[in-house]
Amino acid sequence: MYVAVKGGETAIENAHAWLAEERRGATDIDELSIAQIREQLGLAVNRVMAEGSLYDPDLAALAIKQSRGDLIEAIFLIRAYRTTLPRFGYSKPVKTDEMACDRRISATFKDAPGGQVLGPTFDYTHRLLDFKLAAEGEVPAAPTAQPRTEATPHITEFLKGEDIIQDEPASDTTPGDLTREPMEFPSNRPLRLQSLTRGDEGFVLGMAYSTQRGYARNHAFVGELRIGKVAVEMDIPELGFAIDIGEIELTECETVNQFKGSKTEPPQFTRGYGLVFGQSERKSIAMALVDRALRWEELGEDNLGAPAQDEEFVLSHADNIQATGFLEHIKLPHYVDFQSELELVRKLRREAEERMQPKEAAE
Amino acid sequence: MNEYNFAYLDEQTKRMIRRAILKALAVPGYQVPFASREMPMPYGWGTGGVQVSAATLTPEDTFKVIDQGADDTTNAVSIRKFFENTAGVKTTEETEKATVIQTRHRTPEAKLRKDQIIVYQVPIPEPLRFLEPRETETRKMHSLEEYGLMHVKLYEDISQHGAISTAYAYPVKVSDRYVMDPSPIPKFDNPKLEMDAIQLFGAGREQRIYAVPPHTKVVSLDFEDYPFEATKADHPCDLCGAEDSYLDEVIMDDAGNRMFVCSDTDYCRSRREAGHVGRLAEENAA
């Protein structure tokens, strides 16, 4: 006799218990601490902060630990936590031209005020597995120098004098907030940038790469890439002035793109912009390329029908929390739908057979 | 979970959702955009329904959750537990006793009353989505009441297959105006959409809420010569003998023997308690 499947509740509890055990792994191996993850898996922490849209290295490290290193799962934990936080207000725009740069490079000028600073980069490492690390990870202290104290100007500022690069006029318009208003299309650049900076790194990378390979090709130079800390200031109404409430690490990328001019714009260099929490170079460069591709309309370019030019396509599919949720929901029971499809297919087959039969008889 | 507000969402968010619900009730079948929040369960797993339920529930409510018609499917269990923890509301498996019912893929068999609210989880709220992927286009089509594409699709089904080949999420026209996706309920449930209770539809990932107020005209799209037909498996329930309920087909053994049972577990249980007996239920009693 058939008994309906019961006990979903116990099954769920047991699954959670097993999951917790798997997460811990073999108990004769030391447990990871939050501080270890934060200090030694810093780039994973950065990605979780960037796509989770919450700057908190300790919580990001906790999320990575809890998610067994599944970064999308960690991002999800951070997002779900973030939505429960009340909004006290908004900071003033951060001043990236006053950034204390750990790294600052330009691919367009050999040298510029502020210099080229490589910083802690993988760029010129040879990707050879370092078996010494398997034994012990202690390293000698890196050489140090006197840090630059004055502000490092943006590279694009130097092009501005010649009027050879598209101007980005400053605006005091309050940008929309995609976490507080439903996304509607056509959107606008602030919302596009918000969507891209929290978008999935792999998706944004793929979109950017597609523009390099010819789908709305727009040859980009990295005008400047800078990584460092900036102060966050906020107006405190009770005080009547702004104070520093902390500092955050950011990666900023400005691309300079070839542009032959259009019906509405003269030939000049155009720009793409990327700004991401933490040291997230690949993401910020990719973001700048996609930003530039999405600006075709404002620059009077042709719509080539390329995926990276299509705002609705890019923004609707960039969020990995939306994507993974919907993708994985097909694991949920669908037997009611499936049953109705079963009956329909049976009915259509019956009817098709009936239609076939008289024909065969006549032959 | 006292660290969270009643029913998890903060009051500001609930107010925003309630405004969307009121607008949705005022314009039946119209998809109202709302600033959907990230919930602690994944998008696609009922976040829209959960947000609508959270904005609808009061401490006095009695809450029921079903998935595929059943109270004990894993995701229904998980959502019910979420509200037990965050809202502390009473929960029930009895349709009769519930004041708010959240559902995925079914409308209960029992007739709902005017003091009840049913909340549907919706994956893709746009009935025209698979004909036109762009939201900018489909919104235009709705505003112009331009539904020709949908009729062409239904016509093409008939010309190719001899029948409309949509078995669930069968499109309806609400109050002679908006074409609406009733969520992936089997088309068997479509006639029940004209009811005494308030019906709310929440799509979290797609950021849309829509509604069918009580006693609103809901017509399943069809043609005069190919009228809509609410179909189900041509069997009675093997447990309770019901002839009027939607059935799940269950494979019983390696020989591929099947049985058919009510998908609405509460309906089946209450019928059996009232003494109704199906083909295979007697063996059990013996």
Image (cartoon, coloured by chain):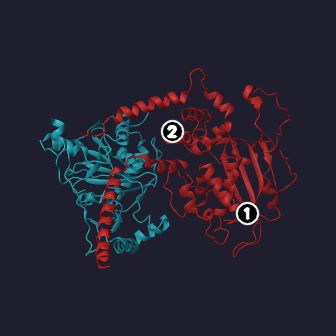
Q: Residue furthest top?
A: A28
Letter of the chain that mark 1 sits on in the rendering: A
What residue is at 28 percent from the left and 37 percent from the top? B91
Quadrant location, the N terminus of chain A: top left
Q: Position of residue B12 (x, y in %)?
A: 43, 45
**Image: A166 above or below A39:** below
Of the residues shown, which amino acid type is indicated by label 2? Tyr
What residue is at 63 percent from the left and 42 percent from the top? A47
Left or right? Give the position of B82 relative to A313: left
- Labelled pair 2, 1 in contact (Cβ < 8 Å): no
Question: Label 2, label 1: how many angstroms apart (C-alpha)?
Answer: 39 Å
Q: Residue furthest left?
A: B275
Q: Circle 2: is it few (<14), some (14-19), or many (20+) Cα within 10 Å?
A: some
**Image: A187 above or below A282:** below
Foreground residue among A75 and B140? A75
Helix or strand or loop: what does disc 1 sit on? loop
| Dot label at residue A167 | 1
Residue B238 is at least partly visible in this image:
yes
Q: Residue furthest bottom?
A: A362
Report which colour depicts chain A.
red
Residue B254 picture quarter:
top left
- Count up the numbered dots: 2
